[in-house]
Image (spheres, coloured by chain):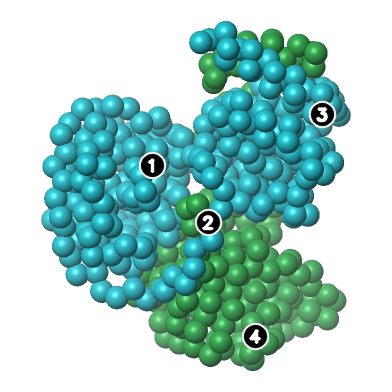
């Protein structure tokens, strides 16, 4: 099969991009399409994960849904692609369905596994906010797959990527970007493998130092529950849950969060959940792998210390 | 202003998720249906606020069967002027998008609003597909929307931050948290909703491009292992050697 992977390059090749390329290379021969004024040497890494060709459109610099859709459609046409893969991130949510509609392709949104081709083309996806999975069958000649972050770790598949300029008429940008307000440093939450999160149990924004220290020791990204974001203790982009961001890290540590069903909907894709709460009846313990009934103010610093000792012993 | 808000029904957020018929159908027994929160709290309420300020109408559109009528009436009770239901089972996002696009293409709406996703399928698909079928710009994951004449200014979630964008009407958007606050319908709204127009129209022919083969529930957690709060070395050891996540 011929696979086209769309990636976005924003100062670096993201982990989500490597996941998509690695995923694609397990389905077939991968060409990648991207845009922007990118130095070829920056894209060579895509070859290590299975890309054989990288098409770069240098005529646009920011993501516009209609232009990107035309770009991917033109590349798919040139490469005779049967399968189009992209990350189910903010850009992917904007353009994945557009591309599918343009190509009259069946769209699999939120894929978490490779296609099963033993009987047609069926992909497992996340539904009911992580409370269930659906196996979606697509029979159209072209298939579009939007891949959830942290579902399949990127694996090396050494190829040499040929990096070529790609030109196509993309029309005008009908959405004008006036301003970009950057939020947070470090690993974005949806891509983070390790997440430390806290809720109202922390009693006030001034107490987040112990959360941040644990996150720093782990190399984790910080998150929070909805009430904490709503009252302004923490920025909104940290809010995980039903109405915030849904994440599926390898490790989710929750301190002072009771575990309302709406919070669980955002985190139940986590591989391992650690819950720290003073209330042994907190519903979150039912979803936890490891539980500590205790005061976050005491437990978090002890955990940070234990981790620091562990890291020191590993060196 | 003429606004179209896409509404779908979903199981209440606290519903127990189970499947029947060999895991091919959602188990509806005892399930309470609600308007998809992103469609209601954010898309519909913001549309109503805009019309209250600038004048105009808010129409809701739903692809569904008469089982959807109670949730459509709820949207009318909150304040939509009228409703359209395309009479069909919504099994495939492209099918749904095609019906909505066909209807919208005849009506000259200034903005078509959807929620960012439904809480049952989480697909985030219909808005983008409608936009492509209508050849309109699509502002996804919008958290703020203001309109001045033919120009709309929006904020949207993008990788690493928030983008402030400008777009001319007509366009399509998907609404995320931040757009508006939930409104509880009052008695007058509920009474008025009973007589507001709910037009049922037959679906146009369109093949489904995807289908659900089966559903599956995640494996139950094997149970929580409790660790002494004084013994965080044990937790670190378990995370490293047993869970292998650090």
Structural crowding at the residue carrying mark 3, measured as other residues with C-alpha within 10 Å and reported as few (<14), some (14–19) or many (≥20) = some
Compared to B29, does A50 lie above or below? above
Numbered marks: total: 4
Residue holding disc 2: A182
Residue in view at x 14 percent, y 50 percent:
A164
Residue holding disc 4: B51
Specify the quadrant of the image occupied by residue A189: top right
Q: Nearer the viewer, mark 1 or mark 2?
A: 2
| Mark 2 vs 3: CB contact within 8 A | no
Q: Is residue A271 left or right of residue A156?
A: right
Q: Secondary structure at mark 3?
A: helix
Residue in view at x 64 percent, y 90 percent:
B54
Mark 3 vs 1, N-terminal side: 1
Query: Which colour represents chain A?
Result: cyan
Q: Which mark is residue A297?
A: 3
Q: Nearer the viewer, mark 1 or mark 4?
A: 1
Query: Which colour represents chain B?
Result: green
């Amino acid at each position: 099969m011929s696979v086209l992977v769309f990636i976005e390059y924003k100062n670096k090749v993201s982990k989500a991009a490597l996941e998509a390329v690695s995923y694609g290379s397990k389905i077939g021969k991968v060409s990648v399409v991207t845009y922007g004024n990118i130095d070829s040497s920056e894209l060579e890494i895509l070859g290590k994960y299975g890309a054989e060709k990288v098409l770069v459109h240098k005529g646009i610099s920011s993501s516009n849904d209609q232009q990107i859709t035309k770009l991917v459609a033109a590349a798919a046409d040139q490469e005779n692609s049967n399968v189009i893969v992209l990350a189910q991130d903010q850009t992917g949510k904007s353009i994945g369905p557009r591309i599918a509609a343009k190509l009259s392709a069946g769209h699999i949104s939120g894929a978490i596994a490779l296609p099963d081709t033993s009987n047609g083309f069926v992909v497992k996806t996340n539904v009911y906010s992580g409370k269930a999975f659906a196996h979606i069958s697509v029979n159209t000649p072209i298939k579009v797959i939007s891949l959830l972050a942290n579902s399949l770790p990127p694996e090396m598949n050494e190829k040499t990527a040929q990096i070529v300029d790609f030109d196509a008429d993309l029309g005008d940008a009908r959405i004008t970007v006036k301003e970009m307000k950057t939020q947070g440093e470090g690993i974005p939450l949806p891509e983070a493998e390790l997440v430390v999160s806290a809720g109202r149990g922390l009693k006030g924004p001034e107490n987040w130092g112990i959360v941040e220290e644990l996150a720093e020791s782990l190399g984790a990204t910080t998150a929070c529950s909805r009430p904490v974001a709503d009252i302004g203790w923490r920025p909104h982009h940290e809010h995980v849950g039903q109405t915030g961001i849904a994440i599926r890290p390898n490790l989710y540590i929750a301190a002072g969060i009771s575990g309302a069903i709406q919070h669980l909907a955002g985190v139940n894709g986590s591989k391992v959940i650690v819950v720290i709460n003073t209330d042994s009846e907190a519903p979150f313990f039912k979803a936890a792998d490891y539980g500590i009934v205790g005061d976050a103010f005491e437990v978090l610093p002890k955990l940070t210390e234990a981790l620091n000792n562990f890291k020191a012993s590993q060196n | 202003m003429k606004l179209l808000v896409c509404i779908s029904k979903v199981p209440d957020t606290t519903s127990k998720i189970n499947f029947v018929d060999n895991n091919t159908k959602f188990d509806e027994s005892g399930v309470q249906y609600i308007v998809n929160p992103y469609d209601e709290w954010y898309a519909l309420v913001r549309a109503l606020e805009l019309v209250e300020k600038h004048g105009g109408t808010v129409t809701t559109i739903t692809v569904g069967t008469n089982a959807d009528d109670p949730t459509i009436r709820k949207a009318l009770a909150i304040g939509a002027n009228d409703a359209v239901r395309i009479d069909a089972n919504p099994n495939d996002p492209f099918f749904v998008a095609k019906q909505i696009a066909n209807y919208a293409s005849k009506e000259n709406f200034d903005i078509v609003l959807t929620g960012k996703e439904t809480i049952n399928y989480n697909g985030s698909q219909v808005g983008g597909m409608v936009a492509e079928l209508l050849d309109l710009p699509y502002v996804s994951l919008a958290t703020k929307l203001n309109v001045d004449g033919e120009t709309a200014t929006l904020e949207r979630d993008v990788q690493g931050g928030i983008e402030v964008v400008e777009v001319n009407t007509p366009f399509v958007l998907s609404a995320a948290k931040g757009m508006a606050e939930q409104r509880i319908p009052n008695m007058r709204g509920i009474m008025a909703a009973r007589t507001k127009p709910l037009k049922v129209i037959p679906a146009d022919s369109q093949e489904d491009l995807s289908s659900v083969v089966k559903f599956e529930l995640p494996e139950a957690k094997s149970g929580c292992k409790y660790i002494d709060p004084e013994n965080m070395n044990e937790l670190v050891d378990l995370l490293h050697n047993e869970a292998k996540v650090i």
